[in-house]
Image: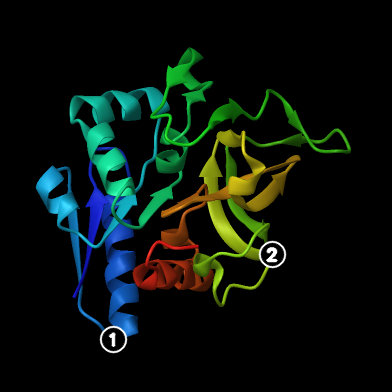
Amino acid sequence: MNKVAVIDYGMGNLHSVAKAIEYTGAKLGERTEVVITSDAQHISQSDRVIFPGVGAIRDCMAEIRRLRIDRIIKQAISEKPVLAICVGMQALMLQSEENDGVKCLGLIKGRVKHFGDPLLDPHGKVLKVPHMGWNQVRQTKSHPLWQNIPDDSRFYFVHSYYVEAEDLDQVAGVTNYSLDLVACLSEENIFAVQFHPEKSQEMGQTLLRNFLTWDGSQ
């Protein structure tokens, strides 16, 4: 049995993530137990951890610290494969510009930056923020989670802030929205994505399937 913990701190589309994992596990032909939880014991007993998130980073970090999810995440990262999604990815960084500056978990060296107002394309056309919808992801290094996913596949994004990584060797994929920005990061047994795999149809399901069979090595 494959036990997956979806970390619950009140900020995320938890049930859609859980349903996507259950569906993907069933397609693999194995029993997959998904638990939505903030309980450290449940998370420590899982085989894999998903760290989702949507909303304002200030509120997310306040709940993460109130529930001591920061300690749970650090422990999980030391033990098992972890998939961070959207604001979950941003929360791993050092600092975010959102809400006049918010200190994040500092588990990956990088910062979260605002797109700019206005955000212009190379021809001077104003682009909408948030960056919402389908966009191509160019794979910048090989990784087990890219298995059977063609380069430049399209994934679904919804975000107003983006990650700027300090270590470019950690960048596993980029997308372009006026500028090249980080779509994926990988560091040891962490894989973090700015897009939503649970909303990304076939390619998202493939990435989730790869996660369910990933042993955390690169």
Q: Residue 54's x, y, as percent?
A: 39, 40
Q: Amino acid at mark 2?
A: Asp
Marked residue nearer the N-terminal end (1 or 2): 1
> Which residue does the image show at 45% across and 42% down from the upper left?
89
Q: Is residue 117 above or below residue 45?
A: above
x and y percentages locating residue 115 in the rendered image:
65, 30
**Residue type highlighted by circle 1:** Gly
| Quadrant in the picture for the N terminus | bottom left
- Residue at 27% x, 70% y: name it: 22
The residue that appears at 26% across and 53% down in the rendered structure is 6
Judge the density around disc 1: few (<14), some (14-19), many (≥20) Cα neighbours within 10 Å. few
| Residue located at (48% from left, 16% from top) | 101
Disc 2 is placed on an element classified as: loop
The residue that label 2 is drawn on is 152
Q: In the picture provided, is 46 more to the left or to the right than 153?
A: left
In the picture, the disc for residue 172 is none
Q: Which residue is mark 1?
A: 29
Classify 122 as above or below 157.
above
Q: Quadrant of residue 143?
A: bottom right
